[in-house]
Amino acid sequence: MKAKAEAQPASLDALKWFAVLLLVAIAVAGNMYYADTPMIYRVVGVVVLCIMAGAVFLRTSKGMRLVNLAREARVEIRKVVWPTRPETTQTTLIVLAAVALVSFILWLVDSMLSWGIKSLIY
């Protein structure tokens, strides 16, 4: 009994996925077919069809899982303790100083290697 209950949504999912692919295909084909039409109309048509495809996608099992994931991520983001402005400034300055120091060291090594190669060649 349970297998029958699970099989039916899977068949509906296949139909929904077919509808999503069909809407996207219609958007692409319509955009190509109506190439002579002004761009704004084609853009509006493609956007409308993509929104419709997205709405159908969100009704599939994967789409529902995506919505659930987004909700859970939003809850988790609320739990994050964000750094204060002074902490962010200090961290940024430390990173900039480290980048400047490594850049100087790499420039120095490059200059020495360049000088060594030039002295060997000439």
Image: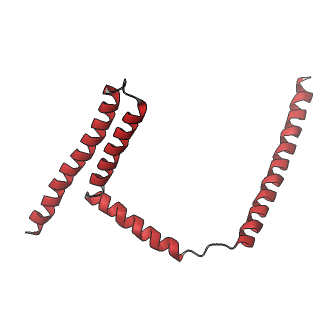
Does residue 115 lie above or below 67 as drawn? above
Residue 4, image x, y percentages: 9, 63
Front residue (pair 5, 21):
21
Kindly indicate the quadrant of the structure image that contains residue 10: bottom left
- Quadrant position of the C terminus in the picture: top right
Q: At 31% across and 26% down in the image, what residue appears? A: 33
Q: At 32% across and 63% down in the image, what residue appears? A: 65
Marker count (numbered): 0
Residue 102, image x, y percentages: 80, 52
Residue 67, image x, y percentages: 36, 63
Q: At 48% across and 73% down in the image, what residue appears? A: 76
User: In the displayed structure, does residue 57 sit left or right of residue 75?
Assistant: left
Residue 63, image x, y percentages: 31, 58
Does residue 36 lie above or below 103 as drawn? above
The residue at the far left in this view is 1
Front residue (pair 74, 44):
44
Front residue (pair 23, 15):
23
- Quadrant position of the N terminus in the picture: bottom left
Kindly indicate the quadrant of the structure image that contains residue 114: top right
User: In the displayed structure, does residue 120 sit left or right of residue 67?
Assistant: right
Kindly indicate the quadrant of the structure image that contains residue 31: top left
